[in-house]
Amino acid sequence: MTEWTQRLAALLHRLFAPSIYFYRNPFKIFEYNLMLRQADLSRNHTVLDIGCGVGKQTFCLAARAGRVVGVDPNPAVLKRAEEDRLHYHDTLPVEFVCATLREAGLQDSTFDRALSYSVIEHIPDWPAVAADCFRVLKPGGRFIFSTDTLDTIADEEIRNRHKTAHSVCRYGSIEVLSRELQAVGFRVRHAESFCRTNLASRWFERDILSGGACSWLRALGRYAVLRLAESFGPRPGKGLFLVIDAEKPAAGDAG
C-alpha cells in the first residue's frame, strides 16, 4: 500500500468498519458475500464462527446478528482478534473462545447459525467437527461453510504448493462432504461451486506463486471483476471453492 491509500483505508475503517470490503483478498470478499446470502442473518440469530482466525468475518457477522461467538484454537490469531475488538469493535455483540469446537464448552442447541470460512480443509478429523456443530445448533439451525476444491487448477505443482503452504489436509467435494454431513444428521439444503471462471483460476494461481495478498484498492477492483465474470461464467460448473448449506432437522421433521 502507498502512504495515501493507507491513510484512506484507516479513515474509512474508523468510519465504516466492520466491512468485508476492507479485506485485502478478492476471493475472501466473494466467499463472505456468497455465504452471507445463504445465511440470511437477523438480529434474532446467535451465530457461531468456527475457525474464526483474526476475526475479520466474525466482526462483520456481529454487525448483522444478535450475538456471535468466534472459536479458534490458535492463541496468536485470537490475541489479534481481541485487540481489534477492543480498539475498533467494542460495541459489537462478539466474543472469542480459544479452543477447539469440542473443547470450547458450548452448550447443546445454542446457535441458530454456524459458519466456517475455508477452514474444514485444514482439519484432519473433520466429521467429528461436523458432529460437534450438529450438537450445538438448535433444531432448524443451519451450518453454512466453504472449503477449497481447486477443481479448476490443473497444474499439480501449483496444487501441491498451495496444499503445503496452507496446511491443507484434503480438498473437498460436494458428494463426499454431503455424505459426511448426512452421516451425523444434517440435511443438505444447498451446495454449489464458485469462482468457476478461467479468470478466477489465473488470478488464484498467481496468488499462490506470489504468496501475497492484493493491495486494498486492487482487491476491491478484482472482486468487482470476479463477480461480473462469475455472473456470465459456466453455471453450474467446477470451481476453486464450494459452499454448502446444511440444516439440523427440527424435532419430528422427517424430510
Image (cartoon, rainbow, N blue to C red):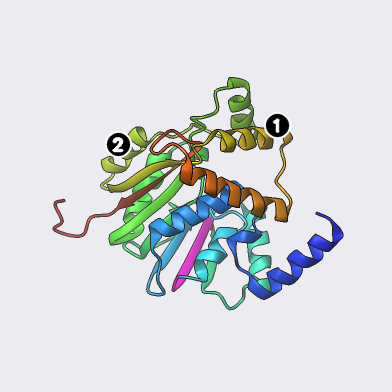
Q: Is residue 202 above or below residue 41?
A: above
In the visual, does 137 lie left or right of 253? right
Above or below, comparing residue 117 to residue 108 in the picture: above
Labels 2 and 1: the sequence-earlier one:
2
Splitting the image into 4 quarters, where does residue 158 fall? top right
Q: Quadrant of residue 12?
A: bottom right
In this view, which residue lies farthest toward the bottom?
Answer: 91
Residue matched to label 2:
179
Identify the mark at residue 81; answer none if there is no mark.
Answer: none
Can residue 73 be seen in this snapshot? no
Residue type marked 2? Arg
Within 10 angstroms of label 1, few (less than 14), some, or many (20 or more) residues?
A: few
Span shown in magenta:
65-71
* Image location (x, y in percent) of residue 206: 68, 34
Q: Position of residue 80 (x, y in %)?
A: 68, 60
Q: Position of residue 6 (x, y in %)?
A: 80, 61
Q: Residue furthest top?
A: 156
In the structure shown, which secondary structural element does the residue marked by tag 1 occupy? helix
Kindly identify which residue carries mark 1. 209
Residue closest to the eye, 38 or 180: 38
Seen from the viewer's position, the closer of residues 214 and 230 is 230
The residue shown at (62%, 33%) is 202
Q: Is residue 37 left or right of residue 80?
A: left
Badge 2, how many Cα within 10 Å: few under 14, some, many 20+? few
**Residue 215 position in % (x across, y down):** 74, 51
121 lies left or right of 85: left
Q: Looking at the image, can residue 240 be seen?
A: yes
